[in-house]
Image (spheres, rainbow, N blue to C red):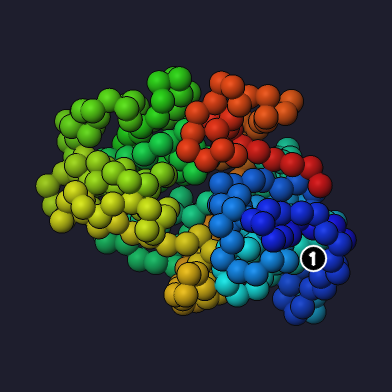
Amino acid sequence: MQALVTAPGNIAVISQIPIPEPGPGEIRIKVRSVALNPVDALYVAHPVDKSGRVVGSDIAGTVDKVGDGVMRWSIGDRVAGFLQGATSGNYRPGGFAEYAVLEEDLAIAIPSGVSFDEAAAALFIRLEINAPFPSPFKFPESHTTERPAILIYSAATSVGLYTVELARLLRTPSGAPYRIFATASPKHHERLLSLGVEAVYDYRAPDWPERIRAASGGITHAVDCISEDETTAQISQTFRAGGGKIAVIRLQAWNKEGVRADVTPLYGAVWQGLGKEILYNGSEIPASESWRRLSVAFYEWLSRRGLSRIVDDGFRLLGSGKVADRALHAHGKEEWMRPISAEKLVYYV
């Protein structure tokens, strides 16, 4: 089969590799669509292992073959999922290929009416707040009617938009919805407000942390969808007295100086949800069965129409034409991301 693999010179090339076989409890997927994430390009430009690794995380397609003991899937079923492609020192093939293998309970059933393109993505939340799906974790009981405030920094990114979609489904133990605040470029404010965000602030304004804290009464949870330089410290200034937690998406790119002492940044690689250890830059993130159980619960919720509730008004797919044609009007740190704004790159296989 053809697959996109890492190659010398910090590039990725299409190569011919053997078609994988599903083991016990696994399914093989004929990949129809793949979604590009910034992390996919990141680990091609800055590889963590030798060349020859299949890259890519988010996939959607049809079940092509099932391994021994598989009960929940049949050949031809439409499914989606994600893989740990080229993001860890231990070899596990990614999804940018004609075929991919998943464990059967880590696949999502694609609802009718949802295309392969729309299904080629997934998200996990690393915050101790109630989720809109069955969870193996217990949350403190509360009888307060207070609506906690959550901040999503850079909410127009793909991670940010999915966080908005999930955050508006969150409920406290007493059933109260969360108040959602966000930062984004002004051109995205109207759209985010239409998705249920209470207020959006321009992250370039010097006083946005103070304005959010005043409007919200103090943030209780936040998701830093950039996690670089001063972003985490700025977010911490929006929290109420007593602090809270910030989910960060990168471990070493944000400055610890300036982060409030009562605010705790939490980092977790999304691939922990696969229940496998992760080797990265000489260190190891151990396998976590509890996070795998959370993944299974999340996937079951997505399979029961949860996925369609997210994609109905989620981010739009990239329009036709070449990405390179947008370069003259684009802004951003990474060259490969400059033309993309509030959109998702999805490719047919």
Q: What type is the residue that disc 1 sits on? A: Arg
Is the residue 185 above or below the residue 126 in the image? above
Provide residue 259's location: percent of width, then percent of height: 21, 51
Is the residue 185 above or below the residue 303 in the image? above
The quarter of the rendered structure image containing the N terminus is: bottom right
Judging by the rendered image, the residue that carries numbered circle 1 is: 28
- Please report the residue visible at 48 percent of the width from the left and 38 percent of the height from the top: 333
Q: Residues within 10 Å of mark 1 (few under 14, many from 20)?
A: many
Quarter assignment of residue 16: bottom right
Q: Secondary structure at mark 1?
A: strand
- Please report the residue visible at 46 percent of the width from the left and 24 percent of the height from the top: 188
Provide residue 255's location: percent of width, then percent of height: 28, 52
Is the residue 329 above or below the residue 287 in the image? above
Is the residue 204 above or below the residue 70 in the image? above
Q: How many marks?
A: 1
Classify residue 186 as left or right of residue 317: left
Residue in the foreground of this view, choosing between 45 and 86:
45
Classify residue 233 as left or right of residue 342: left
